[in-house]
Image: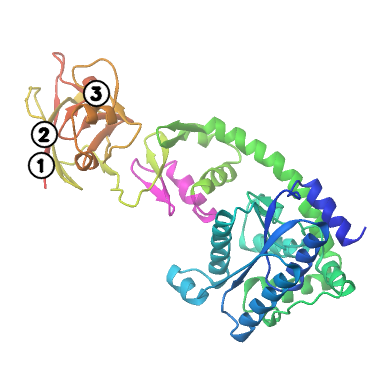
Amino acid sequence: MNVATQFIEFVKKNHLFSKNDKLLLAVSGGVDSVVLTHLCKHAGFDFAIAHCNFQLRGDESDRDEQFVKELAKQLNVPFYSKAFDTKKIAAESKKGIEEAARDLRYEWFEMLLKEHSLTNIVTAHHADDNIETIVMRFFRGTGIKGLKGIPVRNENIVRPLLFARKQELLTYANENKLSFIVDSTNAEDTFTRNYFRNKLIPSLKEVYPSVEQNLQHNIERLNDAAILYEQAIMKHKNNLLEKRGEELQISVLKLKKTIPLSTIVFEIISDFGFSASQTDEVIALLDSDTGKYVCSSSHRILKNRNWLIISKISENEFPIIVIENDETQVSFGHGSLKLGTSKPQLINDHSIACLDFKTISFPLLLRKWKEGDYFYPLGMKKKKKIARFLIDNKLSKIEKERIWVLESRKKIIWIINHRIDDRFKIKDSSQQMLKIQFLPS
């Protein structure tokens, strides 16, 4: 079966796109993307061409852009191009050149889809790219999902050449007399992928001549294994994760009994921006003191007694402050709290919380309130959302943003400077009182 026929069969088998779709082809000018363009045109698909000029190779970068522009003109299809100051952007964002270029590329492609009502981004990744990716991920460290290789579809990004080896594409280009650009940096080992392509894999072939074919077959087997793996992981997540408002909670006792612990923890935390190297840190939280936490760039995992709490970190978020039973004064974003014990007495002052010491469990957590929080307002037997409480008390938006709460055993005991929870009030039977006074800054 020739490449053109395999291409059409691969597109149909994987339901990648149809002749009713409007495609955006990512074309660099190299043999892979030129063959992709030719195959799409030959098969009658509707498409436009997009070219990124990353300005990394001087005149060669401009030459490539002009070549792709002429190709689009010959095929009579829309052409879009954009130049990026990639080195500068990479330095400013503290990313590697390859990572920065990839991010810039796909961000721009997404914009083009919206602006021109296009349906799919089509890239020319092929089987050799897949093999290189697998080897790179293996040595860098990855889970079984990473060993699946490059997905045929990732949302609106599709890769219809993953069935083909590089040599097959070169043969097709020569047979059809297709012109293409040869990137001079492909022979350099400056970039990570080029090192694996030009050095490591050829060295492996000296020992195992069929290494590439074997890896390709392994990818197929791992894809099947990954399906079963993901089904098992989902069962563990459903069993362990409990949603509470905007947070997710995990029972420490349940998680400790889970086997294999390290793998399950990694699969849970990887959804929230945590890296594989942080897995051991999160596992260490299981036996840590309350208040310890581990952060990713977007989320925090906090140990709170017998629970791990996963919550999103907002840009303006204040930290969670842990208050131990021997602390007498704690400062926070809008003031401080003065703590002490005494004989029970009623004090009619909203800045002072008079609480039954017997009902309180330390450590306490002091934090900003959030959507989904609720408590039992003093004098009421039914719970009330804090959001509704603040509305009923006619607090302004700015005043709402300054509200903090005090928590014991995952129960809110006091909305600072406003109302205590009825479950923790002083009663006739109370023997000792925890007095907490709010001192504004």
Residue 195 visible? The answer is: no
Label 2: element kind:
loop
- Is disc 2 surrounded by few (<14), some (14 to 19) or many (20+) residues within 10 Å? some
Q: Position of residue 272 (x, y in %)?
A: 49, 47
Q: Which residue is mark 3?
A: 359
Q: Position of residue 328 (x, y in %)?
A: 14, 41
Q: Position of residue 399 (x, y in %)?
A: 19, 40
| Sequence order check, earlier mark of 2 and 1 | 2
> Magenta span covers which residues?
273-300
Q: Residue 439: give its label.
A: 1
Amino acid under disc 2: Ser
Measuring 73% from the left and 76% from the top, which residue is drawn there?
A: 198
Q: Which residue is mark 2?
A: 351
Q: Residue furthest right?
A: 1
* Quadrant assignment, res 179: bottom right
Amino acid under disc 3: Thr
Q: Position of residue 155 (x, y in %)?
A: 63, 49
**Nearest-to-viewer mark from 2 and 3:** 2
